[in-house]
Image: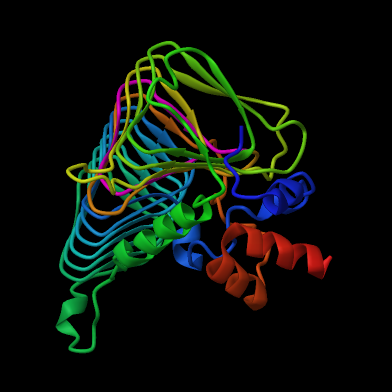
Amino acid sequence: MKKTNNLLIITTLSMMSSAQASVIPSGLLDGDLNEQSIYANFGVTLGDHTKVGGNMQGASPITTGVNSVVGGNIEAGTVVTIGAGSKVGGYLLAGTTVSTGVGAEVGSDIFSGTTTGTGGGSTVKGDIEAGAAYTSGVGAAVNGNIVQMLTNDPSYEAPKVKNQHAQLGAAQETLRLLGVGYSTALGIVFGTTTETLTAGIYDSVDHLTIRAGKKLILDGENKVGDFLFNIHNYMNFAAGASVKLINFTDDTKIIWNVLGDVTGTQGYFSAEAGATVRGFIFAKGYVRTGADTTILGVGNSCGGATSREDYVEFGARNTIGAEGCVGTFSNPVPVSEPELIALFGFGLMGLIIARRKKA
């Protein structure tokens, strides 16, 4: 069912099992964004009791609900607010203020551009460096050093978080181009019943919806091969919809690239209550989930989601990545400069040919 342009492509695709590992380019994201499980241009919010296995970053505020858990670091361009009873395994960094709720726990340091406040009975296992004043609730503990009023030093620079808008736009366009001429079209009725797909590049000109309670089965066929979905309008997993993986290898990647490049669309990704998603989501617009939603990677990768132009909001009791997971693109297969030239000059076929000549 693959859409192909000529006999050469058909012949090459029949021999490309080893090259399929390179469908997702290793240089897709830089070192910083590689390590993020969640990024949003306009705010990240976690619902109560939601767990995130990896790191979170945002150009705007980041807020976690009560009794939430973040396994890695949190970096926000403005404010970081940690809910009561929540735990963060790594450090907190904010361009302006940091506040933690009653009984919260931070596993490393806190860096704030202005004030830092910790709630009663909370714990910070590292240092606190605050641009302005530090305040603590009754029984709050800081295991390391406290340095405050750093703005009194004329040479002080507040923490900064890079806006990743341009990089995410380039990544989404790269993924789109991979499918030009080499993708399988998904019709408007795709997802109304249980569906099974093997590794490849898939294209949905309009929206892509997996209906309530339906499964999308991704069959890796016990081979290394990526799944790339280019979606030009929006993506929705209805209540209880799920992705099931069979015959998978741990280095397989699943990418949902929600472009929003159809006139009048926002390119959002949504998952309703009880949905189960696998892989990593690139969205132009917002990413929003209902209660009890799960987003997991493949193998030890976190999976996760980015919003290029909007917010990421996870509902209550979500699970985003497993404990101890790593970034989706942290251990890539290197792509050489000649291969990158082949990729952008001649598309996926050029990259396949370059890899075959190298071998």
Where residue 173 appears, as percent x and y from the top left, is 41, 58
The magenta span reads 280-298
User: In the image as oriented, which residue stretches furthest toward the right?
Assistant: 359
Magenta span includes 269: no
Q: Visible in this render: residue 149?
A: yes
Furthest residue in direction front, as rendered: 6
**Image label count:** 0
Decide if residue 224 is on the left or right side of residue 322: right
Pick out the residue farthest to the bottom.
155
Q: Where in the figure is residue 285, as x and y percent of width and height?
A: 25, 45
Q: Relative to 117, is 188 above or below?
A: above
Asked if 25 appears above or below 140 in the picture, the reply is below
Query: Can residue 305 be seen by looking at this rendering?
Result: no
Relative side of 53 to 168, left or right: right
The residue that appears at 44% across and 22% down in the rendered structure is: 190
From the image, which quarter does the N terminus lie in? Answer: top right
Q: Front-most of 33 and 154?
A: 33
Q: Nearer the viewer, residue 12 or 246?
A: 12
What residue sits 23% from the left and 89% below the top? 155
- The image shows residue 310, relative to residue 278, as above or below, that is below
Q: Tell me if 184 is positioned left or right of 49 in this view.
A: right
Report which quarter residue 120 is drawn in. Answer: top left
Decide: is 30 above or below 326: below
Residue 289 sits inside the magenta stretch: yes
- What kind of colouring is applied to the model shown? rainbow
The percent position of residue 23, horizontal first and vertical second, equals: 62, 53
Residue at the spot x=30%, y=36% of the render?
A: 234
In front here: 14 or 80? 14
- The quadrant in which residue 3 appears is top right
